[in-house]
Image: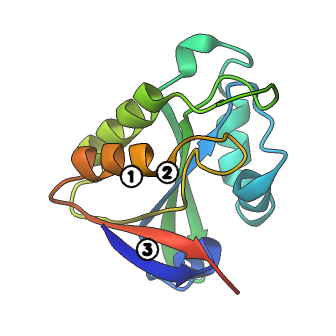
Amino acid sequence: MNVVHGDIIDLAENGELDVIIHGCNCFCRMGAGLARAIRHAFPEAAEADRRTAKGDRRKLGTISVAEVQRAGRVVTVVNGYTQFHWAGSGRLVEYEAVRSVMREVKARFPGKRIGYPRIGAGLARGNWEVIARVIAAELAGEDHTLVEYSR
């Protein structure tokens, strides 16, 4: 796992990443954190999310995808359904959902430069050490980068 500091949206728009992944809930909200920023920067990703079934627990571990064109570049935005709800106490992220999302990303985007934040470790209150191990195992052999937010 590579680690860089920056803004994942800027890195994608500048052509430094081909695919960006972020964690979503199953209710088509994209109302906080990075999901909200992606909704504003890449409305195509929010539209892909809205085309999924709202509140469907079967979405956990799946993805929706938006191919976004910016300045002559194509960026793939992956909405990874890693938590059922956006509210509640305790851990919201489901580690097996993260595993399934990453497995699907590897299968669909081999050889691409993949970037992601600390999926599930912020607002979803997951343990980053656990999540990082899952991501490293599932994206083994791929060019993948943790983007630590900084402006």
Residues at marks 1 and 2, CA–CA distance in whole angstroms:
6 Å
Q: Residue at x 74, y 19 (%)?
A: 54
Q: Disc 2 residue type?
A: Trp
Circle nearer the N terminus (1, 3): 3
Residues at marks 3 and 2, CA–CA distance in whole angstroms:
22 Å
Badge 1 vs badge 2, beta-carbon distance below 8 Å: yes
Q: Position of residue 148 (x, y in %)?
A: 55, 73
Q: Position of residue 89 (x, y in %)?
A: 78, 26
Viewer-closest of 151 and 40: 151
Q: Residues within 10 Å of mark 1 (few under 14, many from 20)?
A: some
Tag 3 secondary structure:
loop
Q: Disc 3 residue type?
A: Leu
Q: Residue at x 67, y 51 (%)?
A: 122
Which color mode does the image show? rainbow
Q: Mark 3 highlights which residue? A: 17
Tag 1 secondary structure:
helix
Circle nearer the N terminus (3, 2): 3
Residue 101 occupies which quadrant of the picture?
top left
Which disc is residue 121 wearing? none
Badge 3 vs badge 2, beta-carbon distance below 8 Å: no
Q: Disc 1 residue type?
A: Ala
Q: Residues within 10 Å of mark 2 (few under 14, many from 20)?
A: some
Residue 78 in the image: above or below residue 86: below
Q: Nearer the viewer, mark 3 or mark 2?
A: 2
Q: Mark 1 highlights which residue? A: 132
Q: Position of residue 42 (x, y in %)?
A: 70, 61
Give the number of marks.
3
Q: Mark 2 highlights which residue? A: 128
Q: Residue at x 56, y 32 (%)?
A: 81
Q: Position of residue 98 (x, y in %)?
A: 44, 36
Viewer-closest of 94 and 110: 94
Viewer-closest of 60 and 149: 149
